[in-house]
Image (tube, rainbow, N blue to C red):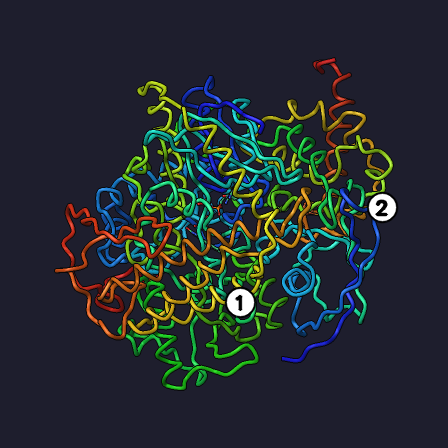
Amino acid sequence: MDVINTDIAIVGAGGAGLRAAIEIAEADPKLNVVLISKVYPMRSHTCAAEGGAAGVIKANDSLDYHFNDTVGGGDWLTDQDAVELFVNEIPRELTRMEHWGCPWSREDAGTVAVRPFGGMKVMRTWFAADKTGFHMLHTLFQTTLKYPSIKRLDEHYATDLIVDGGRVQGAVCLEMSTGKLKLVKAKAVIIASGGAGRIFPFTTNGAIKTGDGMAMAYRAGAALKDMEFVQYHPTGLPGSGILLTEGCRGEGGYLLNKDGYRYLQDYDLGPATPEPVLKSMELGPRDRLSQAFWHEQKKGRTAASKWGDVVYLDMRHLGEKLINERLPLVRDLACSYVGTDPVTDLVPVRPVVHYMMGGIHTDIDAATTIDGLYAAGECACVSINGANRLGSNSLGELLVFGARAGRHAVEHIRTTKPAADKLVEKQASDAEQRIKLLFERKGKERVSVLRNELTHSLEDGCGIYRSGDLIQATCDKVSEVRDRYKDVMLEDKSSVFNTDLFQVLELGAMIECAQTVAVSALERKESRGAHQRLDHVERDDVNYLKHTMAFYNPNGDPRIDYLDVVITKSQPAARVYGAAAGGQHI
Amino acid sequence: MSTRTITIEVLRYRPEQDQEPFFQSYTVPCDEDWVVLDALNYIKDELDRTLSYRWSCHMFVCGSCGIVVDGEPKLGCKAFVKDYGDKIRVEPLGNFPIERDLVVVIDDFIEKLESVNPYLIPKEEKSIDDGEYLQTPAQLKAFKQYSMCINCLLCYSACPQYGLDPSFVGPAALALAHRYNMDSRDVGRKAREDVVASHEGIWECSFVGACSQVCPKDVDPAGAIQQTKITSAIDYVTSFLPGGNR
Ligand SMILES: Cc1cc2nc3c(=O)[nH]c(=O)nc-3n(C[C@H](O)[C@H](O)[C@H](O)COP(=O)(O)OP(=O)(O)OC[C@H]3O[C@@H](n4cnc5c(N)ncnc54)[C@H](O)[C@@H]3O)c2cc1C
Ligand code: SF4
C-alpha cells in the first residue's frame, strides 16, 4: 500500500474542507495538508446551495437578533455558546469571502446586498443571485490554488479512519482511477464530508451525499448527535426533488393550495399580507412550512399531479426582470424540469428532504471526542442548528467552523507529542482486507435493491410526522438491511473507476447513518422542531432538552446516550411566528 | 406517467478487458420527463452494474455529467429524453482520453485551470475590519457571466483547436482568467498574461465559436477570448509607445 505522510489530512473538499485547508495554509505554510475528495472539489455539493449565507452587516440588524432567530428556530436544542460564537464570526468570514473574490450581489452604492430568508427577523442573507453556494465553492477552490502547501487527492474515496491509542493517525483512501489503496498518515484529521440526505428517496441532495464521513467517524468511536432531526425543505420540484430556493419566497413568492389560497395563514403564521413580512407566512421556518403541507394534504387541499400531491409556488407577481436578475437558476430549473415558467405559471412544489441537523458531535473548536479528529460543515453537529436549521445558516457554518477546525488542528499539532503508532499499518491492512473480501466473495444482495428498501423505509418511518409504531418498523427494516448488507454483491470486479464498488461502500455508510436516525427518533418521545411525533405531540423540556448521542455497535442498534444542551442567555420558550414575531416588513 | 422504450447505445471501454471502445445497447423504459442521466442510472441499477459515469447534483451546477449525446456535448442532467428519438447514442466527452466508459481523464484541464492564476489579486490587501471592497452592480456585471463556468468541459469537447493541439489553454480556463481580469477588485492581469497571451493562449483560438454554442451556462468563452485578444493587442501596441514598458 502506498503511504503518504502529511501533517493534516482533510476528508472532503466542499466549502468546509476548502475553508479549513486555507486556514491551515495561512496559519503555517510549512505544514503539509492533504485534501482528499471523492469528487473534484468544485463538484462538491456546496455548489448546489442557491439562496445565500446569513451574517449581520446592516445597521438595522444586531448579533442578538441573529442569535435569537437561530436559537428559537432550532427550538432551543441549539448550544448557545456555539451560536453566539457563530453569529459573531460569520460577518468577518463573509467579508473574507468577498476579499477572495466571491461575486456577492450588490446594492447600487457598491455595498453587499442582503435578502430576506425564512425564520430571520431582519434581512441579513448575503447572496450571489441564486447560485450562492456555487460561487462560494469556486471562490474557495480557486483561492486554495494560491497555497503550495495544499496537496489534493482528487477522486480519492476515503474508506476508514486510523485511530490508535485513542488518537487519530490518518485515513485510508482508494484512488478511484486505479483502485489502489493509499494510507495517508497524519497528525490530525478533519472530516468535512457533507451530509447524508441520500438515505431518503426524495431529496435535494446530490448523489455524493451518502454520509461516508459521518459513518467513518462513528465506526471509529465518535458519537453521531441529534441524527433524528432531518430537515424537509418546503419547496422541492416534484419528481426530481430539485430545490427551488427559499429566496423565491424571500423575494415575495406565495405558497398556494389547490384552491389558490395562501394556506399558511391557517397555521399560526399569518396574517397574509401581500408584501412579505419576515418570520411570517412564507417566511416562516422550514419545519413549520413542511408540516403545514402535511396537514393540507390530510385535509384534501393539495393538488394532484402526475408526480403526486403538490402545492403551488406563485412568483408571477414578481415580474420577469426580478426573476431573471435574482432567480435565474430557479427559472431555468422550473422550465426544464416541470415545464412551468415562474414568470407566467404556478410552479408545483412539495416538501423534500434537504439537510441533516445532526452529525458528528464536536465542541465549539470543531474537535470530536477522538484526539486529533475534527469535523466541520454538514457532517458535523456543533450544534448551531438544533432541532431545525434556519435557511442560510449552513453556508456560514461551514466557513466559521471549517476555519476553526483548521486553526485548532494546527494548534493540536503544535502542542501534542507524536503518539505510538503500532497499530496503524495493521488497521490499514484490515481496511484493505475488507475491500478484498468484497472482490472475492460472491454475495447475493443487490446494492440497488437494498438501497431502495432502506431509503423508502426511512421515508415511511422518519418523515415529516412520525409515530412510535412506524419508527419501530423502520428500525426493524434498517437492521434487516444491515444484516443483508453483509452479503452484498459486488458485480463489477475491475479496478479502474469502479463505481459499483463506490456505491457498495456508500451504501454501507448510508445504512449506519440511517440506523442512527431511526433509533434516535424512536427514543425521542416528544415533538420538537423537525422531529414531530403524532404519539408525543408536545415538546418536553423536562426530559428531552438534550442532545441524542448515538454510539456505534457493530452487532446491533446503536447505544443511545444524552448530553445536556448549553443554555447561556435564552431560556426555552414558545416559538412565535406570524404577526406576533415582529419581523421586518419588506 | 407515460413511458417510452428507448434504446440507449453507450460507448463502453474498460481498459482492463477491452481492446478498444465499443457500443453496447440497453433497452430502457424512460419516463417522459427523464433526462439521459436518469436513463444511465436506470441501466446502472437495473441492467448493468459495470457501467461507469460521473454525476452528482442533477441540477446543472456541479458540472460532473458532461457526455456526448447524439453527437453533441451535453450535460446528462440537461439532455431531456423527450427531445430525442427512440435510439440515443451516448459517448464520453471528446478530446480527452477515456479512463473508462463515460469517464474521461481531465487532468490536463485541471492543470490549465491552475495555470491561469484564477484567484483575486488585489492592488493592496485590505483588512477584514475595513469591510468589503465596493463594487457597483455595473462593475459586477462586467465579469459576472464569466464567473458562471461549472467546469463541465463541454466546450473543450466541442473545440476543434483543442482537438488539434492539446497544448491550447482552451475556452473555460481562458474565460476564467478573463473573469478575474474584468473584476474591478483585481489587478492581476499581468500575472495571468504569461499563460493567457502566450502562443498556447488566446492567439491559438481560431474563433469558431463552438464553445459558446455548447456552453450550458451561457458563459460565452469565445467572447471572453475575443475580448482578451483586443486588450492584449492594445497592450502590445502601447508597450511600444513612449512610456510603454518595452
Ligand atoms: C440544493 C441545496 C441548496 C442549499 N442552499 C443553501 C443555502 O442557500 N444556504 C445555506 O446556508 N445552505 C444551503 N444548503 C446547505 C449547504 O449547501 C450544505 O449544508 C453545505 O454546502 C455542505 O457543505 P460541506 O462542505 O459540509 O459539504 P459538501 O459541499 O457536500 O462537500 C463534501 C465533500 O466531502 C467529500 N466526500 C464525501 N465523502 C467522501 C469520501 N468517502 N471520501 C472522500 N471524500 C468524500 C466530497 O467529495 C465533497 O468534496 C443547501 C443544500 C442543498 C442540497
Ligand atoms: S465555459 Fe461553459 S461549456 Fe465550458 S466548461 Fe464552463 S460551463 Fe462548461
The residue at the point 73 percent across, 48 percent down is B154
Q: Which amino acid does label 2 sit on?
A: Glu
Residue A514 screen position, x and y as percent: 41, 58
Q: Quadrant of the N terminus of chain A?
A: top right
Q: In this view, does A65 lie above or below A183?
A: below
The one of A576 and B13 positioned closer to us in this rendering? B13
Which chain is home to disc 1?
A: A
The residue at the point 33 percent across, 59 percent down is A229
Label 1 neighbourhood size at 10 Å, few (<14), some (14-19), many (20+)? few
The one of A522 and A63 positioned closer to us in this rendering? A522
> Which of the numbered marks, if any, corresponds to residue B11?
none
> Which of the numbered marks, if any, corresponds to residue A319?
1
The residue at the point 81 percent across, 33 percent down is B166
Which chain is home to disc 2?
A: B
Q: Mark 2 to mark 1: distance in Å?
A: 54 Å
Q: In which quarter of the image is residue A31?
A: top left
Q: Quadrant of residue A167?
A: top left
Q: Can residue B39 be seen in this view?
A: no
Q: Which amino acid does label 1 sit on?
A: Gly
Residue B188 screen position, x and y as percent: 60, 26
What secondary structure is found at the residue carrying circle 2? Answer: loop
Q: Is residue A315 left or right of residue A394?
A: right
**Pointer 2: what residue?**
B20
The residue at the point 48 percent across, 79 percent down is A309
Decide if ligand 2 comes within 8 Å of the CB at mark 2.
no
Q: Is residue A81 left or right of residue A102?
A: left
Residue A525 screen position, x and y as percent: 22, 66
